[in-house]
Image (spheres, rainbow, N blue to C red):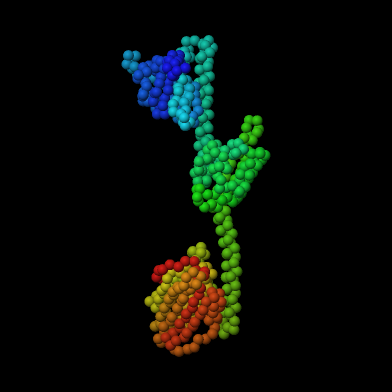
C-alpha cells in the first residue's frame, strides 16, 4: 500500500485525527477533525495548536501535561473527559463554544527512539453531555454512549485525583531530609531516588540503571550483598554508623562516610519480592563528633593526671624545708595561678595551641609596660609545651620581681626569641635579659625555682639552659626543639 493510499484512508476516517510535531504544530489533520474544530485544513496545518485554541485554565493545563508526558516517556496517554472551548468563526456569530472531548495521544518514534510526532484521535462528546445536562431524556433511556461517557468522566476525575495524590506523595518523599530510594528486580534497578540521596552520591544519573553500574565505588563493602540478601530472603537488613567509602566523581579520591540505613523488601500483589526500599541517614558528622569527643575525654583524662602530678610536685617542693610558711604558701599559690592562667589560654583555643607571645604578655602583665619589652615571631605551642613554658616564665618573672631587675624602680626586662632550623631540627631560642643598674652584686642561689627551670627545659622539653648573673642583671638563655610546635608565622609579638 502506497503512501497516497494511507493519505486517502487518513482523510476519510470518520473520527477526528490530527498529527502534531514536537513544537505542537499541526502537521496533518483529516476532514473529520477540521469539521469538528470549525476550521479548514489550510487554517490548521503549520500553526501551533495552543495559538489557535488557547486555554490558560485547568483544561489547557491538562492537555499540555498529556502532550508533555507523551514526549517525555514515549508512551501513549488518554484523557477520558475534558471540556475545551472552541472559537466560533464570524459566520457563526463569533465568540467561543464550550465543547467536551475524549482524546488519545499516541507517539510516533524516530529512528533514534525519540518522539518525532504525536497523533491525536479526538471524539467530540458535547451532544451527549448536553442531552444529560438538559434532562430531555431519562438517563436510563439514553443509548450506551452516555453511560459510557458518565463512566469515562468518573474514571478521569478519579484518575486525576489519584495523580494529584501521587504527585503530592512523590513531592514529600523527594524533599524528605533522609535518603530514600526504590530499587526493582534482582539487579536492583533504581526507579525512584529523592533529593537527599542524589546529593549524597554526587548527583549521578541513576533512574533505570542497576546499582552495581552506577555505584561501582562501593563494591567490596558489603552493600550489594546485603541488597541481594533482602531480595532473595525478604528479610530486612539494618545498620547503624556503618562505614562507607564513596567517590564524589570518577577520578576523585574515596571519602569516608558513615550511615544509618535499612533495606526492606517490596512485595507485589501476590506477596513475591519485587524490589528493595532503601532508607538511610548520613551520620558522618555525628560519628566524627563522637570520635572527637572520645579523643578529647581521653586527652582530658591524660591532662588532668599530668596537672595533678605537676601540682603535687609543686606542693612537695614549695613546702620542703620551709623557713617562712607564709612565703611558701604565697609562692605555691602563685604557681597554681600561673598554671591556671595557662589553662585559660589553652581553653580559649580549645586546647589546640597557645601563642608564645600571649603566654608571655599574660605573665608579665603585673609589671609596668614601659619597663618590659617582648619581641619575636609568632609561635603556636602545643598544649604540653604551653603549660611547661608558662611555668618557666612564671619562675623567671617571680625571681625578677623579688630579687632581680623588677624588684626596684629603675630596672627593665627584655625577652626575645627566634626560631631556626628546618623540619625536625627546628629550634626555639629564648633570651630573658634583666637590666638592674642599682642592683647589688650577688651569686645565683640554687632553689626550687632553678630546679623547676632545669627539670622543665632540660628534662621535659629536652632542651638546654644557661643562667648568668652579671653586674647588670640576670641573663637566662634556653633552647628547645620545636617538635611540638603546631604553627609558626612571621609576625612581631
Q: Residue at x 49, y 69 (%)?
A: 423
Q: Quadrant of residue 373?
A: bottom left
Q: In which quarter of the image is the C terminus?
A: bottom left
Q: In which quarter of the image is residue 61?
A: top left
Q: Residue 475: x, y in percent?
A: 45, 82
Relative height, residue 164 to residue 247 (above, below) = above
Nearer to me, 192 or 334: 192
Relative height, residue 356 to residue 401 (above, below) = above
Nearer to me, 425 or 258: 425
Q: Residue 174: x, y in percent?
A: 51, 39
Q: Residue at x 57, y 64 (%)?
A: 300
Q: In which quarter of the image is residue 336?
A: bottom right
In the rendered image, is residue 389 in sight?
Answer: no
- From this viewpoint, which residue is outermost toward the bottom? 441
Relative height, residue 385 to residue 432 (above, below) = above
Q: Residue 202: x, y in percent?
A: 50, 46
- From this viewpoint, which residue is outermost toward the front? 2
Q: Residue 32: x, y in percent?
A: 42, 15
Q: Residue at x 58, y 70 (%)?
A: 306
Nearer to me, 306 or 43: 43
Q: What is the count of numbered marks?
A: 0
Q: Which residue is drawn at 65% across and 32% down?
A: 271
Nearer to me, 228 or 415: 228
In this image, 164 relative to 43: left or right?
A: right
In the rendered image, is residue 221 in sight?
Answer: yes
Amino acid at each position: 500500500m502506497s503512501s497516497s493510499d494511507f493519505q486517502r484512508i487518513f482523510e476519510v476516517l470518520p473520527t477526528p485525527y490530527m498529527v502534531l510535531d514536537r513544537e505542537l504544530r499541526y502537521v496533518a489533520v483529516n476532514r473529520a477533525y477540521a469539521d469538528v474544530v470549525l476550521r479548514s485544513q489550510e487554517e490548521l496545518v503549520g500553526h501551533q495548536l495552543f495559538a489557535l485554541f488557547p486555554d490558560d485554565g485547568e483544561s489547557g493545563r491538562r492537555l499540555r501535561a498529556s502532550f508533555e508526558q507523551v514526549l517525555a516517556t514515549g508512551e501513549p496517554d488518554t484523557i477520558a473527559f475534558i471540556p475545551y472551548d472552541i472559537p466560533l468563526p464570524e459566520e457563526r456569530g463569533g465568540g467561543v463554544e464550550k465543547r467536551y472531548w475524549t482524546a488519545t495521544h499516541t507517539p510516533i518514534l524516530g529512528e533514534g527512539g525519540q518522539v518525532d510526532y504525536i497523533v491525536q484521535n479526538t471524539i467530540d462528546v458535547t451532544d451527549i453531555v448536553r442531552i444529560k445536562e438538559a434532562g430531555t431524556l431519562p438517563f436510563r433511556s439514553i443509548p450506551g454512549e452516555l453511560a459510557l461517557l458518565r463512566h469515562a468522566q468518573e474514571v478521569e476525575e478519579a484518575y486525576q485525583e489519584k495523580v494529584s495524590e501521587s504527585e503530592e506523595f512523590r513531592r514529600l518523599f523527594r524533599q524528605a531530609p533522609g535518603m530514600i530510594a526504590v530499587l526493582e528486580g534482582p539487579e536492583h534497578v533504581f526507579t525512584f531516588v529523592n533529593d537527599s540521596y542524589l546529593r549524597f552520591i554526587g548527583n549521578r544519573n541513576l533512574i533505570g540503571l542497576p546499582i552495581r553500574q552506577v555505584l561501582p565505588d562501593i563494591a567490596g563493602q558489603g552493600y550489594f550483598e546485603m541488597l541481594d540478601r533482602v531480595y532473595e530472603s525478604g528479610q530486612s537488613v539494618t545498620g547503624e554508623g556503618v562505614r562507607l567509602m564513596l567517590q564524589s566523581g570518577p577520578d576523585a579520591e574515596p571519602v569516608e562516610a558513615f550511615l544509618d540505613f535499612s533495606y526492606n523488601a517490596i512485595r507485589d500483589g501476590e506477596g513475591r519480592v519485587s524490589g528493595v526500599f532503601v532508607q538511610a541517614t548520613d551520620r558522618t558528622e555525628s560519628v566524627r563528633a563522637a570520635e572527637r569527643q572520645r579523643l578529647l575525654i581521653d586527652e582530658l583524662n591524660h591532662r588532668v593526671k599530668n596537672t595533678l602530678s605537676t601540682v603535687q610536685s609543686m606542693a612537695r617542693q614549695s613546702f620542703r624545708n620551709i623557713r617562712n610558711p607564709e612565703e611558701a604558701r604565697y609562692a605555691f599559690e602563685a604557681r597554681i595561678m600561673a598554671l591556671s592562667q595557662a589553662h585559660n589560654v589553652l581553653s580559649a583555643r580549645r586546647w589546640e595551641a597557645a601563642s608564645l607571645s600571649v603566654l608571655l604578655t599574660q605573665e608579665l602583665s603585673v609589671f609596668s609596660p614601659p619597663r618590659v619589652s617582648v619581641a619575636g615571631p609568632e609561635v603556636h605551642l602545643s598544649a604540653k609545651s604551653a603549660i611547661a613554658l608558662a611555668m618557666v616564665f612564671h619562675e623567671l618573672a617571680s625571681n625578677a620581681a623579688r630579687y632581680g631587675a623588677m624588684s626596684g624602680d629603675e630596672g627593665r626586662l627584655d625577652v626575645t626569641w627566634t626560631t631556626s632550623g628546618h623540619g625536625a631540627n627546628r629550634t626555639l631560642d629564648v633570651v630573658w635579659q634583666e637590666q638592674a643598674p642599682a642592683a647589688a652584686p650577688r651569686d645565683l642561689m640554687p632553689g626550687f625555682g632553678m630546679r623547676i627551670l632545669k627539670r622543665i627545659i632540660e628534662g621535659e622539653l629536652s632542651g638546654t639552659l644557661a643562667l648568668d648573673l652579671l653586674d647588670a642583671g640576670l641573663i637566662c638563655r634556653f633552647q628547645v626543639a620545636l617538635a611540638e610546635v603546631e604553627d609558626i608565622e612571621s609576625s612581631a609579638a
